Amino acid sequence: MEARVGVSSHGGAVVDGGARKFLQSHHHHHHQPPVHQQNQIGTVPQLLAGGIAGAFSKTCTAPLARLTILFQVQGMHSDAAALSKASIWHETLRIFNEEGFRAFWKGNLVTIAHRLPYSSVNFYAYEHYKSLLKSIPGLQSHRRSTSADIFVHFVGGGLAGMTAASSTYPLDLVRTRLAAQRSTIYYQGLWHALHTICRDEGFFGLYKGLGATLLGVGPSIAISFSVYEALRSYWHSQRPDDSTAVVSLACGSLSGVASSTATFPLDLVRRRKQLEGVAGQARVYKTGIFGTFKHIMRTEGLRGLYRGILPEYYKVVPGVGIVFMTYETLKKLLSHGPFDS
């Protein structure tokens, strides 16, 4: 889920789940000696590098992301027979045969448009919340303690994620609706979708499913953070000579898998709430988040809450790797550019 995006406390890079931890560890090991120097590059290059790296990673993994969304929303209007035949290979062939190769990237332009503003809001909100939290009287006396740092990182990251998710949520909703369209095209693009949703469902139609998104921010960050730190500590204790980059990539990917597994039901509910009332269709879920959970459990079972989890898993490792490589390359290029401070 998008709220999984966080901020690196060492590098300032704004990237997705496991990649955030990957870059954080990388910055920690490569920039530890000059304690007074916060970053190699200025704020604007960081935002550009983080945003572009995230957008490029999303573009490379867009086919898997679209498959995830299509599987997540299948149970809304499909019968049991159709659901039993669903498979990644079958759905991939259907998209290619019925919609064409370009259809694997439906909604990706909106994802790219979402990346930079989301990253910017997340970055600045994190810095603001971090300063605010450090000014709390109880934390001022424990400024250099590990527990205080973890508290500031976790709470500040959670609040920043909620702020960024709320402020850019309409773009996320439009992306879901564009990606969920099959042969019948109701929304022609970003601006047409925004106008049509406001006309058909009112302004608050742009925020359907926001509750499930915000509810998943805290658990997602907590699981990602704790799993990453535990795996990294264990790995270094067993194999202290291994490359930092390899350890960070592996631990970041596994923490992303763990976080996705734990929060996937919330993400699935969010997607289905986002599609309520599309093109005048009858509402399926007439209750809140927990009522929707009960409805899915009753009609589709526990398996229904994890519909689409496999393509989500498949995109974790390449997503983390692509973000890291792109971010590091752009950081080197931008460090000598006009934005460097």
Image (cartoon, rainbow, N blue to C red):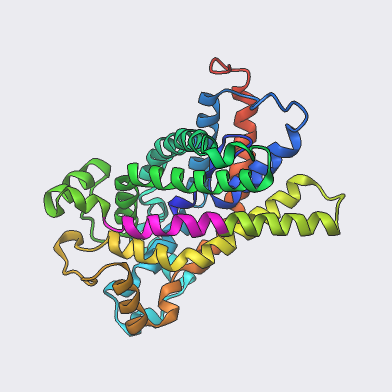
Give residue 214's quadrant in the image. bottom left
Q: Compare residues 284 and 91 and report the one nearer the observer.
A: 284
Classify residue 207 as left or right of residue 116.
left
Task: Tell me the quarter of the image containing the C terminus.
Answer: top right
Q: Position of residue 110 (x, y in %)?
A: 35, 44
Q: Position of residue 244 (x, y in %)?
A: 77, 46
Check the image and report above or below for 302 versus 63. Answer: below
Check the image and report above or below for 212 versus 294. Answer: above
Magenta stretch encompasses residue 110: no
Residue 335 shows in the view: yes
Classify residue 126 as left or right of residue 194.
right
Task: Tell me the quarter of the image containing the N terminus.
Answer: bottom left
Magenta stretch encompasses residue 213: yes
Q: For the magenta stretch, what is the residue range?
A: 208-222
Give residue 120's quadrant in the image. top left
Classify residue 137 as left or right of residue 111.
right
- What is the total number of numbered labels drawn onto the structure image? 0
The residue located at (20%, 51%) in the rendering is 204
Q: Position of residue 340 (x, y in %)?
A: 58, 18
Q: Position of residue 5 (x, y in %)?
A: 49, 47
The residue located at (64%, 40%) in the rendering is 142
Q: Compare residues 9 and 137 and report the one nearer the observer.
A: 137
The residue located at (29%, 76%) in the rendering is 78
Residue 93 shows in the view: no
The residue located at (38%, 47%) in the rendering is 165
